[in-house]
Amino acid sequence: MGCKAAGASRIIAVDINKDKFAKAKQLGATDCINPQDFKKPIQEVLTEMTGQGVDYSFEVIGHADTMIAALASCNMSTGVCVMVGVMDSKISIDPTLLLTGRTWKGTMLG
């Protein structure tokens, strides 16, 4: 809903539970994809779908692998990745994911 209210023209929901896709569409998603339906990493799928990567990504699960995929799916120069999910461990990333201009942010309490 927030993305739609902010004027996003394309909103891609990513989840392994296809039962959530109908609700995602009701809330504004234009595309719904399941990473398990692809043989390549989801960040590659999203980059192919968009041409250059997404403008914004939001990771809401709190898993290290999905956090890295969310960051890597962003446009290399201008993409912004927001971490909403809370982890109980540390995360290691390849710093080159940030050196090209991507922004990685965190948020708590809205």
Image (cartoon, helix red, strand yellow):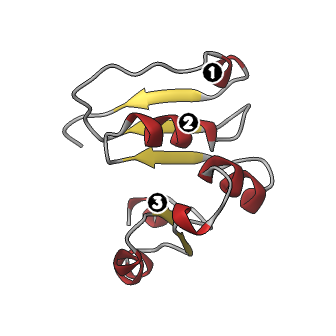
Circles 1 and 3: CB atoms closer than 8 Å: no
- Which secondary structure lies at badge 3? helix
Q: Amino acid at mark 1?
A: Leu
Residue 60 relative to residue 4: left or right: left
Q: Quadrant of residue 94 in the image? A: top right
Task: Say whether residue 12 is visible.
Answer: no
Q: Residues within 10 Å of mark 2 (few under 14, many from 20)?
A: many
Query: Residue 3 bears which disc, if any?
Result: 3
The answer to whether residue 55 shows anywhere in this view is yes
Out of 25 and 21, give the one closest to the viewer.
Answer: 21
Which mark sits nearer the N-terminus, 1 or 3?
3
Q: Are marks 2 and 1 in contact (CB under 8 Å)?
A: yes
Cα–Cα gap, marks 2 and 1? 9 Å
Give the label on residue 98, or none: 1
Q: Is residue 92 above or below residue 41?
A: above
Q: Nearer the viewer, residue 72 or 109?
A: 72
Q: What residue is drawn where x is 46% and y is 18%?
A: 92
Q: Which quarter of the rendering shows the N terminus?
A: bottom left
Q: Nearer the viewer, mark 2 or mark 3?
A: 2
For the C terminus, the image quarter is: top left
Instruction: Return the x and y of residue 51 as percentages of the image width and height.
Output: 80, 54
**Residue at mark 1 to residue at mark 3: CA–CA distance:** 23 Å
Q: Which residue is mark 2?
A: 71
Query: Of helix, strand and loop, which one carries label 2?
Result: helix
What amino acid type should be assigned to the residue bearing mark 3?
Cys
